[in-house]
Amino acid sequence: MKFIDMWKPALATMAALVMLATGGAAVAQDKDPVVVGYIGSFASDTGLSTIRGAEIAIDELNEAGGVLGGRQIKFVKADTREDVVEGVKAYEYLNDVENVDFIISGSIDDVSLAWLERMAEYKTPTLDTWTSYVGIIDKVVQEYDKYKMYFMNIACDEALATLYIDFGKDVLAAEMGYKSTVLMFEDTAFGVSIAGLVRDLLAPEAGIEIAEEIIYDANTVDFAPLFNKAVDSGADFIYLVSSVRSQVPASQYVKLQVRIPMTGVNVAAFGQDFWNDTGGLGGGTSTLSPVPSVGMQLDDRTAAFIEKYKARYGNERPIYPHFNGFNAYYGIYSAFQAAEAAGGFEPLDAWVEAMENTDIVLEKDGEMWFRYAFWKQGEVEPRTGREYTHNIKFDVTEPFDDGSPAMVVVQWYEDGNVAVIYPKKFANGTFQEPSWVQ
Amino acid sequence: MLQILVQGLVLSGFYALIAVGFTLIFSVGRVLNLAYGSFLMLGGYIYYQGAQVVGLPKFPSLIIAGIAGAVFGMLVYRILVKRLSGNVVAVEIATLILAVVVQAAVVLVFSPSPKSMWPLVPGVLRIGDASVTYNIFIAAVVSWILLGGLFLFTGMTHMGRAIRAVSMDSKGAVISGIDPERVNILTWAISGTFGAIAGVFLATYTQLDPNMWVTPLIIAVAVVIVGGIGSILGSLVAAHIIGMLETITTSLIAAELRGVATMLIIIAVLLVAPKGLFGKSEL
Amino acid sequence: MLEAKDLSKSFGGLKALQQVTLRAEFGHSVGIIGPNGAGKTTLFNLLTGEIKADSGHVSLDGMSIDTEPIHERVKLGLARTYQVPRPFAEISVRENIRVSMMEDNLKYMLRVAWDDTGEQEIAESVGFTAQQLDQLPSELAMGDLRKLELARTLATNPKVLLLDEVFAGLTYGEIEHISNLLIERRKTHGTTYLIVSHDLKALQPLVDDVLVIHGGNVIKKGTFDEVVSDPQVQNAYLGTG
Amino acid sequence: MNSTLRRGIYGWIAFAVVMVILPHVVGTGVTRSFVFAMYLAIFAVSWDIMSGRTGYISFGHPFLIGIGGYTTALLTYHLHWPLFLSIPTAVVITMIGGTLFFFPALRIRGTYFALVTLAFMELIYGLVQVIAPNVTGGTRGLSGLETIVTGAIPNYYLALVVLLVLGFTMWLVIRTHIGTALSAVGMDEDAVRASGINVTRLKLFAFMLSAFAAGLGGALYVHYLGSIAPRALFDVGFLFQILVACLLGGAGTISGPIAGAFFLTFLLEWLRPYFPGPERFLIYGAVALVLYVYQPNGLHELVRNGLKRLNQLKLSRNTS
């Protein structure tokens, strides 16, 4: 103890220096705000969508007099650059330096997986709006106590694929008469897992055989050999799965005028900026999209959100939020609804229980159009027969009266218009083959 | 089969275009410019800004990109490389850091979102069963023209011969009255221009994104290693070996092994023939 | 005794050395002369193992060393200096010598302490002052670099020493100093020398025999006086002057 | 013991004392940053012992670190090995992987060696995703790995012990004859051979030492992160951090790279509140570039020159 006493002045000086150097992290706040942290990339369209969706919701709440008895919400952000280790550092920063109460995430799969362990350690309520990896939901199902503070308000990829197979059956097989496909997917975790689901379900459910599989490097610059191989296989269409640099296959498909139609998953096509980004070479691309997607008709509340978004961000990209922008906007509302009910974000169990009971139902034309609620522990999804604890309450069977549809299919036309083509309940356009397909 | 041949040839020509600016600097200055990929990226972004944002016609935009490439090349030489002259490893590392800085700058200015571009020359060339876009076909033709031009330049003109002399023996060249400073500046300018033009083709062929410097750099490095230091002919042959091998791997074996095949060639050549297949100390 | 038998080496089409045979008894000293490009340095490189011979054999003390790598030959007592001095440029004179004095085993090399006096003795024996010990090679003049080259070689404690142009660039006084050192060492250690030099005057007092190489062939062998007076040698090497 | 050595050891003791006290004076956030800084320092030290002096510039160091990390991750995650077995195994496997670096080092050096090691890294990056992605976790990697200790402070001390032991050992090694010989190898390898030293064995020793540190550091690092992904390890960005830490600090000195690693980590953290977005990395890179071009021998050299100048100043003041 004497040693410490002797060194106290020196230690205090050192501490002061370190505090100064780290930016005076612990400057006292006058009104004790609730701190919401954002984790994700800062500059990607998807990252920006989550940030802006959350920002608008937070401003609305603050303007309406604050939360939890009049406290204001402070929004802090930490960049991950879509890098795994930066993701862990950012999660630590939000907790240790910013002392956040709640985290909203616009992280991609592997980044979420990396900070997930820190989340379990800090026990910070966290809502993911972007990653749809079912593996994370599986962790919540299997180790509920460890991961119960985690929620994901986008339908997991398994749900996306399940409904997409219905599209194959109802439209591609029944209407277009396609019988075989070339499964062309990128060599990423996302590509491999979606391809796996399609491989297992397409033939038995939709009756479309897979004539050939082409797995390609995500950095591929030249798709000509791949497209040629696909055409040579004699299949009726290409099923593309692309999440990284997705403009490349889309625009090369148009530039090369590939002779068979192409559909599937093209993440770049989720945003309104797709048309500009491809320089107008996006026509003919159709993709499944998590909801609410570009090209989708909106209910009044969501339309008001879009008006605010446009007024606030103008022509800065993304000019129209991606699905996760909507998810972040409503996600903030869900989280604070739960916090009001539980008396705050602590104790954790109370908040988690309240969060499980949140239910934001959006109606359009007097019918449920969209719903932000979560699967509870032990609840079984009737069609797949398994649990999806803390995933958004999705619905994969018409007429979609239990929850939101897991996805819709959107189609970009050659004139630059985009429309939803499936499921019928949400459709405002039809599936069309590109003009150069014979 | 025809398809593989046509595609392989065109891709190889394109790879030669990507690599030639890199080879040039390596043979004259004996330094590896790991910021070479940034030359391509800048060329692509400047062309994009000109042709697709400002709305200039394509050809002037291409010229502007080429000039910007030359200026950037000279700046890199003057500000970084000259200062570290003689220390090959230091140049390598400084240019690697520069590449990362340029990437961060591009993210800041242009956002990290990838951008696709209109082809320089739209349309598809169909030869029998095979089809290639005019865009990459033109890139390959431009590559052959530029390489031919470079060959003539180094053989016929005074300045070209000076470059060649420095690449063979820089000390000897100084003795015979050549100013190595001028030669170096010129080489970096040429390299910058070639890089920027290759970048425009690369970007119109694929897309623009702030990570796009890595792939062409790896291609250029692979070409130089396989071809050997400072041989234009070697680069040309190496570009064809790599281009054909990639096309064959993608078409016949498995598309995801594309990069793996290139890495294996690099390792094999460095172990078996560290000087490359045509490794000589002349241009 | 160092013995080389029928050493041949060609580079591409160029025959650098053809069937060269050479013998140097312990304590015996051989001068090697010949015009530039005659193959003298190639001969040294073959003896030390830096280059593999196309054919022929090298033995030391009756034992074949054809398969021994360079560092093993050095440990057996065969060391050399380079025509162009190759000091370790960024470490001091003392540390340069230290590298040569090291025993080649990791246990020894993991010691923190070193033999300061031993290093100093060797440095001073070739004529370094104590102040020069901590200088970098870049701060040394050509003559001092030659001395360093020699000091490093002596530090390996050689039985047979191959000296490649040790006198080039040295002043008269320095040549004398080094000559005396070599003569002294030969007396005390019985060291064998193979000396390549253009400086015949400096060579004369040091060698018992002289070997003349021209175009990769040994054209003459004999005592110093026999060789320099030979008309063929004068023609080939010394010119007619 | 000579005086520079003694001064160096005092330096280490001072460093150790400050580091031991530190977590009790700074906040958890800073402590966490120090953990990352120390892991980066361990990797930098590992790079330094292989490349700092010998001229064998490794661009593939993440390859070694990744092997260590993946080995222990796979063993604990799939086969449920205990950590006290999986980590030593990872170190051994990394050392075996290190011999892959050693073979090219028999033939090529400098620039070419850098490129072939870079190719190793790119190759394994490709292979991890292609070969058995259900075992390695493909691009997503594996998460939920066992941690050795939890919480900021225990992890801080774990990393500190490893850094101090590895760093001090390497620093001592550099100060033995080996250090001199390794420097000599970097200047003229043939002349080292001609001094009667088995250069191959010397290089192998340095490489194995380096691989040992990389393997141990990599294994502990993934158990700290709790997850592993190819993008976090076999990546140019990771290489960039290690390389820049070494060069900024002063390659070949061991203490320099540690300083460099601390400097870089904190530079990035200090910038965070002011530049949360991509500007941060622009400034970070630019600072690294300017410092490197200004003094390629690193902070170590800057400090040394500064001290020298100070001494000269004192001397001239005393004489005048």
Image (cartoon, coloured by chain):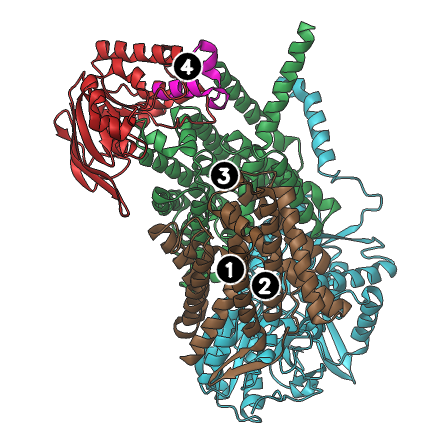
Whole-percent x, y for residue A351 in the image: 69, 58
Kindly identify the amino acid type of the residue bearing the numbered disc 2.
Answer: Ala
Q: Answer few, some or many: residues within 10 Å of disc 1's Cα (few below 14, many 20 plus, some between 14 and 19).
A: some
Color used for chain D?
Answer: green
All told, the count of numbered labels is 4
Instruction: Report, in whole angstroms, how far the alpha carbon at label 4 lies from the one at label 2.
Output: 59 Å
In front: mark 4 or mark 2? 4
Whole-percent x, y for residue A227 in the image: 50, 79
Kindly identify the amino acid type of the residue bearing the numbered disc 1.
Answer: Phe
Instruction: Report, in whole angstroms, how far the alpha carbon at label 4 lies from the one at label 1.
Output: 50 Å
Which is nearer the eye, D4 or C234? C234
Which is nearer the eye, C153 or A433? C153
Disc number for residue B151:
1
Q: Answer few, some or many: residues within 10 Å of disc 2's Cα (few below 14, many 20 plus, some between 14 and 19).
A: many
Kindly identify the amino acid type of the residue bearing the numbered disc 4.
Answer: Thr
Which quadrant of the view contains residue B143? bottom right
Question: Quick check: is C139 in the magenta stretch?
Answer: yes
